[in-house]
């Protein structure tokens, strides 16, 4: 690890002011310290924000819930409001990492964790995300873990978060606070950039801006929510593909469906056309297959990631079968409760 | 820089480089070598300790971030003549071969048992609202952050189940 100055921020404005070139915020540290040990990231200043007041609560907010950026992944998953009203978020969080990591990892840090693309992690390889302009060694290389949606010639790295996939299905926003204390709220589609020719620029956060909360809209009453993750081993592995689904029924037809996908996108992936295609329809295998085909219409897999097409299709079908009641619910599928 | 840590009930003041992880502080400065360094990247769980009562990977956090915090290591769990329920169970069930991962396994299981008692859900929990069963599938899932290269997993799970029975 390269040496750095350690700064413990006492206030949000302290932290904002200390940011800038060569500075890095630290909260849980579970991803950042790994990257610093490998010298993939080597900040000059590390700003510890773990003692900032007011960022560690899960509290009612407008019609929904506000999650402070420092709430640990474990606390968020176990929160009674989240388990009852937004169960897909609990399911996605406990599908990721290990018990030890989830106890440390923060909500804000989960959103800003870096890709686990093997070429990003190997400093002897070309990587446009780690070292802009050097190229991408994934071309002609190992491609099993790469994204298949939203990729560019310069970068195919998949976004690693499970939590963020559920947040996209729940239409969550992030609250961003600037150095002068002003806040703005943006959706995850606005927070995350597509890689294009600058995969090193991952978010739209401006200098001095800090994610201070995640905001969940009003709970989707009467919905069935499902998170289905497929990975190389049963636990503690990143998604090959994952599907988050929030579905309401009107009689025997789908009223609303909000789907999001992990392991396949350069950012937690959502496609409004997929949701629209399901709206008002009678759930069956053919409809779900059509939704998957729509999702995959723009997919450009690396040859070794071709398997993700049929895999995400099957995962989508399986998730929707449970969410619409065509198949009995298994662990991962929950009906929202009316109250906490 | 200086950091004050309360480790196994005893207060220590460290004078250290900001880069020092909590794991290196415990092993190199405080000579508490029961906490093991396996991968040093949060993948193996050999460095698991309790931070203010919750299990974490000591390798993935900076000592500097824990000024004033309470740390429990395997040395603080029991004495050779007065083992914790989990330590007794690991001996009784032969929950190891080489033993290198064992302190991490026991610290992780100690924290995990509290999480189960609090009703925290896991990936294999069928119901998010009710009590969590302390069955083999739950133990396996909840212990997935601890690797055992000798693959003593069946006996590790048995030991944890045995300790859970004792604690009831």
Image (cartoon, coloured by chain):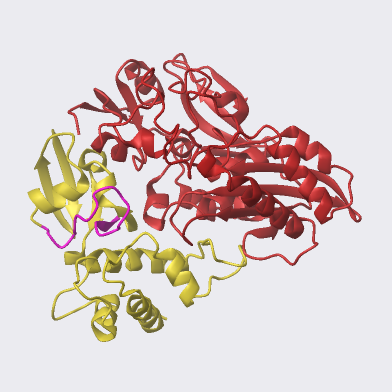
Chain colours: A red, B yellow
Q: Which of these two is toward me, A15 or B90?
A: B90
Q: Examine the rendering and report whether any part of residue A211 can be seen.
A: yes
Look at the image and give the residue range highlighted in magenta: B32-51
- In the image, residue B39 lies at what x, y percent? 24, 52
Q: Which of these two is toward me, A271 or B60?
A: A271
The part of the image, by quadrant, that contains residue A338 is bottom right
- The prevailing secondary structure element of the residues shown in magenta is loop
Q: Determine if the magenta segment contains residue B37.
A: yes
Residue pictured at 91% horizontal, 55% vertical: A251
Q: In this view, does A237 lie to the left or right of A264?
A: left
Q: Is residue A314 above or below residue A305?
A: below
Q: Determine if the magenta segment contains residue A57.
A: no
Q: In this view, does B102 lie above or below A181?
A: below
How many numbered marks have been drawn onto this rendered protein structure? Answer: 0
Q: Give the quarter of the figure containing the C terminus of chain A.
A: bottom right
Residue pictured at 78% horizontal, 50% vertical: A288
Q: Is residue A195 above or below residue B145?
A: above
- In the image, residue B75 lies at what x, y percent? 16, 65
Residue pictured at 41% horizontal, 44% vertical: A105
């Amino acid at each position: 690890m390269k040496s750095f100055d350690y700064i413990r921020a006492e206030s949000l404005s302290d932290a904002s002011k200390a940011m800038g070139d060569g500075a890095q915020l630290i909260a849980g540290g579970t991803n950042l310290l790994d990257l610093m040990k490998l010298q993939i990231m080597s900040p000059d200043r590390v700003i510890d924000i773990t003692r900032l007041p007011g960022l560690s609560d899960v509290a009612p907010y407008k019609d929904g819930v506000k999650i402070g950026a420092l709430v640990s992944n474990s606390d968020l998953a176990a929160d009674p409001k989240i388990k009852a009203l937004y169960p897909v978020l609990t399911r996605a969080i406990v599908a990721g990492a290990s018990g030890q990591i989830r106890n440390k990892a923060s909500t804000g840090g989960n959103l800003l964790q870096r890709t686990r693309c093997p070429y990003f992690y190997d400093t002897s390889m070309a990587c446009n995300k780690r070292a802009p302009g050097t190229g991408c060694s994934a071309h002609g290389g190992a491609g099993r873990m790469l994204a298949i949606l939203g990729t560019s010639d310069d970068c195919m790295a998949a976004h690693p978060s499970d939590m963020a996939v559920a947040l996209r299905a729940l239409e969550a926003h992030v609250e961003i606070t600037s150095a002068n204390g002003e806040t703005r709220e943006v959706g995850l589609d606005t927070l995350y950039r597509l890689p294009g020719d600058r995969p090193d620029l991952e978010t739209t956060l401006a200098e001095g801006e800090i994610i201070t909360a995640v905001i969940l809209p009003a709970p989707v009453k009467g919905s069935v929510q499902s998170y289905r993750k497929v990975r190389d081993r049963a636990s503690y592995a990143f998604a090959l593909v994952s599907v988050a689904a929030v579905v309401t029924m009107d009689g025997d037809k789908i009223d609303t469906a909000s789907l999001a996908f992990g392991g396949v996108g350069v950012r937690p992936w959502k496609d409004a056309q997929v949701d629209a295609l399901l709206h008002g329809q009678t759930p069956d295998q053919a409809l779900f297959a059509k939704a998957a085909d729509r999702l995959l219409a723009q997919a450009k897999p690396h040859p070794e990631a071709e398997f993700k097409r049929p895999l995400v299709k099957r995962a989508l079908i399986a998730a929707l079968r449970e969410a619409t009641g065509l198949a009995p619910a298994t662990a991962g599928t929950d009906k929202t409760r009316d109250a906490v | 820089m200086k950091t004050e840590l309360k480790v196994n009930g005893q207060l220590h003041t460290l004078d250290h480089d900001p880069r020092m992880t909590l794991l290196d502080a415990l092993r190199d400065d405080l000579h508490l070598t029961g906490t093991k360094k396996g991968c040093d990247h949060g993948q193996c769980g050999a460095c698991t300790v309790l931070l203010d009562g919750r299990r974490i990977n000591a390798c993935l956090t900076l000592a500097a971030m824990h000024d004033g915090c309470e740390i429990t290591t395997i040395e603080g769990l029991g004495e050779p003549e007065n083992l914790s329920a989990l330590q007794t169970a690991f001996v009784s069930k032969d929950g190891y071969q080489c033993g290198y991962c064992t302190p991490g396994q026991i610290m992780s299981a100690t924290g995990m048992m509290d999480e189960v008692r609090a009703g925290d859900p896991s990936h294999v929990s069928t119901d998010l609202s009710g009590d969590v069963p302390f069955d083999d599938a739950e133990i396996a899932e909840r212990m997935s952050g601890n690797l055992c290269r000798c693959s003593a997993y069946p006996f590790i799970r048995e030991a944890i189940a045995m300790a859970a029975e004792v604690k009831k």
